[in-house]
Amino acid sequence: MRASVRRLLRSAWPPALVFAVLVLAWDLIANAVHASLSLPGPWYVVTGSWRDRGDLAAAMWVTTEEALLGIALAVLCAVILALAVDWSRAVRRSIYPLMVLSQTIPLIALAPVVVIWFGFGPAPKIAIVALFTFFAVAVGTIQGLGSADPDTMSLLRTMGASRAQILWRVRIPSALPQFFTGLKVGVTFSYVAAIFAEYVGATQGLGYYMSTANQYFNTELVFGAVIVSALLTLALFGLVVALERAVIRWRPPAQVNARW
Amino acid sequence: MVTQRRAGARLEVRALSKTFELEGQEPLLTLDGVDLVAAPGEFVAVIGPSGCGKTTLFQILAGLESPSSGEVVIDGRHAENQLGACAFMPQRDGLLAWRRTIDNVTIGLELAGVRRQAARERAAPLLERFGLGGFESAWPWQLSGGMRQRAAFLRTVLLGKPAMLLDEPFGALDGITRSELQLWLLEVWSEVGSTVMLITHDVSEAVFLADRVYVMTPRPGSVAASLAIELPRPRTLELAESPEFGAHEARLRELLRTPRAAAIHADRA
């Protein structure tokens, strides 16, 4: 444990240093231009947001809920679809191309329509988060299921294994690493998607908070909300990494580190 | 005693041929009238140049491929296209990376509907005998090459079939580990009593392990010759140094060098 903490610290300091330099540069430029409206300095952003922490936290929770529910919906749909595509050649041939085609639709243009369909509540936000997250998880899972070793499956067949037994004992465990890779990509879109959906039409949440702050020229609050959403995305990513490690316990340590 | 001793099966392959029909290509004749017999409890080795169809032969015996013509008979019953008639140990160990040793060796029992707890109880006392004591909850990557093969072999033995097919089980191991495992395999086999058919490309391994060695021709594979190994059991490392052993090896190498000629010779005899 202590070794892993040390390793984390060792790998964390270079980006931390670069980050510190960037913040310092931001501070210097903000002081030089001296225009708190268009470019508030980092200190001003932190103190201003802290003063407004009640509203910010409330907005944060709303958006977090939308993001998490959207991810859950996306994972559910993606896994069911991936299993169907993997199980049946007919489904693969009919659905998979359509799925890829669906990714060419500009979701940004679709968002206002989704709001018209589902109203101003959380439903359209959850739907948009799910739309943004779904594809990465579905593709990862489909590829993962397909990556199962054919020799191993043949071996199980010689032991009399049924298709369902092979799915459960070989294909699904083989799919887990790529499922998690897809999920990691997917969750990085989730907050952005939720905030974007709130921009289109909402009465609460981080997107609504940002657009309102913008209208009142509270630029520091906009910056604060941006930082908060970045931190939340990072936390969510870390959560998925932790979940992955808890679920996939069978990999050698070197491989786990390399996959980070 | 490793596990309940059971009578080995009589394994017969009669006039077995296999042609692969690939789209847009000439049909590929891989096996051409293979005849093999393994008596109950006999240890038979099949040796031949690479590409002679040994692996295809085993896939047919394991039920993974169907023959184009000919038949497989196990204890008098037809067993073409029959999965699960023999216990099969593939070239690569086939251990599932996400299962600990104990769950890897019991997977056959589990698939057959034995409850996990009961399967573990049946396997647990054997782990020690298979050199896996203390490693029951290790992941496959934590095992050495030799241990992985022993685990794969235990998985094969636990299937409880009267015939075992071993496809170059020690091919990927270093020389020292390999000869250790050969000795150990013979010990275990003498306790289990099942019929064994082994694919190998190693002449000494074939002579050391088998009662009878079948030599195959290059593709299309057929049996060029069969050589009885009349060496006493239990086989020891000293025996491997003896002139009789060397004579068997020399004979086998000669048959491998000129398999076609040997086949013609055998036909005339």
Image (cartoon, grey):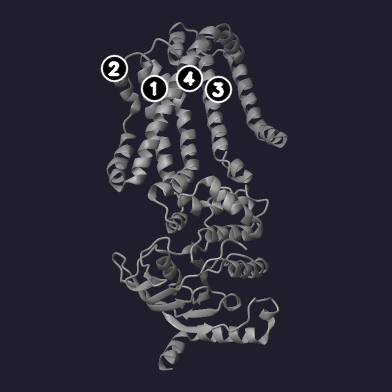
The alpha-carbon separation of the residues under discs 4 and 2 comes to 22 Å
The alpha-carbon separation of the residues under discs 4 and 1 comes to 10 Å
Instruction: Mark 4 or mark 3: name the one nearer the start of the chain.
Output: 4
Q: Which residue appears at 31% of the width and 66% of the height?
A: B22
Q: Amino acid at mark 4?
A: Thr
Do pointers 2 and 3 mark residues of a single chain?
A: yes
Q: Which residue appears at 54% of the width and 86% of the height?
A: B254
The alpha-carbon separation of the residues under discs 2 and 3 comes to 31 Å
With B232 as the anchor, is A3 left or right in this view? right
Instruction: Mark 2 or mark 3: name the one nearer the start of the chain.
Output: 2
The residue beneath circle 4 is A64
Question: In this picture, is B195 found above or below A38?
Answer: below
- The residue lying furthest to the bottom in this view is B269
x and y, in percent, of residue B45 in the image: 52, 75
The residue beneath circle 2 is A116
With A130 as the anchor, is B146 left or right in this view? right
Instruction: Mark 1 or mark 2: name the one nearer the start of the chain.
Output: 2
The chain holding disc 2 is A
Residue A231's label in the rendered image is 3
Instruction: Mark 3 or mark 1: name the one nearer the start of the chain.
Output: 1
Q: Which residue appears at 41% of the width and 94% of the height?
A: B268
Q: Quadrant of residue B67?
A: bottom left
Q: Are marks 4 and 1 in contact (CB under 8 Å)?
A: no
